[in-house]
C-alpha cells in the first residue's frame, strides 16, 4: 500500500451569483492510496479542501476566509448589497486614500467602491509566494477619481493564502504624480471577524494604549490595564499598537492572531444594537456575531513623494484558544 499527500494550490476566476467577478484561492490537500490486490489495482483519492479565500474584484475585497472544516472566519452581513457604489458590508474592505470621514472624500475613501483589475505583471513581492495560493490586484487613478483626489497613484494588493491557512494582505501604494507633488493618505484593512458571541470575546495586546474615541469626537483616552471586553458600542482607534493583536472567541475556543507591518494603529468597532438597527445593510442582531479589528494608519497620515512607495501588511491566522497574544507559540500560530 502506498500513499502520498499532495498539495494543490488553486486560483479560480469566476462570477458570483450576484454577478460580481471574484477570485477563489484554494489549498487542496489530498491523500491518494493504491491498494494492490490480487492482480487488480485499486486506487482512490480523497481530496479535502483545507483552506479557502474569496476576493471580489469590486473593491479588491476579501469576502470569505474558510478553515479546513469549511467554517467561515470572516463576517458578511446577510444584508450586504454587492452593488456598486455601495461597499460590501463584511469581509475586509480596503479604506484608501482616507480612513474615516474627516477629509474631503466619502467615508473610508473610494478604493472599496471601485472595480480593480488583475495585475498581469506584478512586481516581485517581499513575501516569497512559493506554492502559496495568491492573487495580485491593481487599482490606478481614474479621471473620475482624480476630480475627487487630484493625484496619480498605483495601488497593488496581493492576497495570499498561506500553507497553514493564514490570510495575508500586502498593499503597495506608489505616488506616480508627474507634477512633482507629494500626497498624503490614511489607510485601514477594515476587517470584519466572525465571532460566536461578542459578549464572550476578549482582545489582548491593546491594554494601556492611548486611543481616539470616535463616540466622543475622537477625544484621546488611555485604555485600562486589562484585556478589552464588549458590552456596548465601541469605535476606537488605538495608537501605536504592538505588531501582534489577539482576538479570543471564548465560545468557539478560537483565537484570531492579527499581525501587521507598516500600520501603526488598530481600529476596533462594534456598532451594538442601536447603531446596527440604523445601518441599512446590517442585520439588527448581527452585531452579536462580529467584531472589526483593523490594521490601520490613522493618527499620522502617510506622505509619499513622487516615485516613493509605501507598503502595509496585515496577516490573520486562527489558532486554538489555549494561546493568547503574550504566549503565542510561533509553531502553533500557523497551525
Ligand atoms: O471602522 C469603524 C468605522 O469608522 C465606524 O465609525 C463605522 O462608520 C464603520 O467604520 C463602518 O463604516 P461604513 O462606511 O463601512 O458604514
Image (cartoon, rainbow, N blue to C red):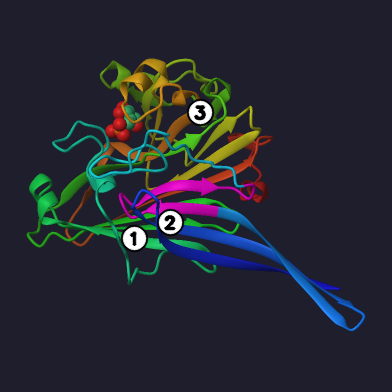
SS label for mark 3: helix
> Which residue corresponds to the image point at 92% horizontal and 80% vertical from the top-left?
38
Vertical arrangement, residue 252 with respect to residue 317, above or below: above
Q: Is residue 220 visible?
A: no
Report the residue marked by disc 1: 137
Residue 64 drawn in magenta? yes
Residue 65 drawn in magenta? yes
Q: Quadrant of ligand 1?
A: top left
Closer mark to the observer between disc 3 and disc 1: 3
Q: Main secondary structure of the magenta part?
A: strand
Looking at the rendered structure, which numbered label has been put on residue 175? none
Residue 309 position within the rendered picture, expressed as x and y whole percent measured from the top left? 27, 58
Report the residue marked by disc 2: 159
Determine whether, in the image, residue 289 is placed left or right of residue 102. Answer: right
The residues tagged by marks 2 and 3 sit, at their Cα atoms, a distance apart of 25 Å
Q: Residue furthest right?
A: 38
Q: Along the line of sight, which residue is nearer the eye, 36 or 167? A: 36
Vertical arrangement, residue 108 with respect to residue 287, above or below: below
Amino acid at each position: 500500500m502506498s500513499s502520498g499527500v499532495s498539495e494543490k494550490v488553486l486560483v479560480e476566476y469566476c462570477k458570483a451569483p450576484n454577478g460580481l467577478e471574484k477570485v477563489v484561492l484554494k489549498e487542496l490537500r489530498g491523500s491518494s492510496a493504491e491498494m494492490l490486490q490480487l492482480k487488480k489495482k485499486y486506487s482512490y483519492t480523497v481530496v479535502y479542501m483545507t483552506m479557502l479565500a474569496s476576493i471580489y474584484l469590486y473593491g479588491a475585497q476579501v469576502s470569505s476566509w474558510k478553515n479546513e472544516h469549511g467554517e467561515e472566519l470572516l463576517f458578511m452581513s446577510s444584508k450586504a448589497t454587492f452593488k456598486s457604489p455601495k461597499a460590501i458590508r463584511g469581509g475586509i474592505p480596503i479604506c484608501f486614500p482616507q480612513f474615516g470621514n474627516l477629509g474631503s472624500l466619502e467615508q473610508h475613501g473610494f478604493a472599496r467602491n471601485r472595480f480593480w483589475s488583475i495585475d498581469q505583471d506584478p512586481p516581485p513581492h517581499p513575501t516569497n509566494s512559493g506554492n502559496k495560493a495568491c492573487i495580485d490586484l491593481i487599482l490606478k487613478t481614474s479621471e473620475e477619481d482624480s476630480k475627487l483626489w487630484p493625484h496619480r497613484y498605483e495601488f497593488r494588493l496581493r492576497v495570499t493564502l498561506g500553507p497553514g491557512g493564514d490570510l495575508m494582505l500586502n498593499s503597495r501604494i506608489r505616488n506616480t504624480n508627474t507634477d512633482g507633488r507629494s500626497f498624503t493618505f490614511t489607510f485601514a484593512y477594515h476587517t470584519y471577524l466572525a465571532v460566536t458571541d461578542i459578549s464572550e470575546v476578549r482582545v489582548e495586546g491593546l491594554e494601556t494604549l492611548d486611543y481616539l474615541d470616535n463616540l466622543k469626537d475622537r477625544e484621546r483616552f488611555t485604555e485600562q490595564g486589562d484585556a478589552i471586553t464588549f458590552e456596548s458600542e465601541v469605535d476606537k482607534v488605538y495608537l501605536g499598537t504592538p505588531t501582534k493583536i489577539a482576538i479570543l472567541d471564548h465560545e468557539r475556543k478560537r483565537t484570531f492572531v492579527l499581525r501587521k507591518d507598516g500600520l501603526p494603529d488598530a481600529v476596533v468597532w462594534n456598532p451594538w444594537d442601536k447603531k446596527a438597527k440604523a445601518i441599512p445593510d446590517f442585520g439588527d442582531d448581527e452585531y452579536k456575531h462580529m467584531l472589526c479589528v483593523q490594521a490601520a494608519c490613522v493618527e499620522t497620515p502617510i506622505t509619499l513623494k513622487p516615485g516613493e512607495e509605501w507598503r502595509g501588511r496585515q496577516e490573520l491566522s486562527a489558532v486554538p484558544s489555549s494561546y493568547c497574544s503574550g504566549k503565542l507559540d510561533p509553531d502553533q500560530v500557523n497551525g
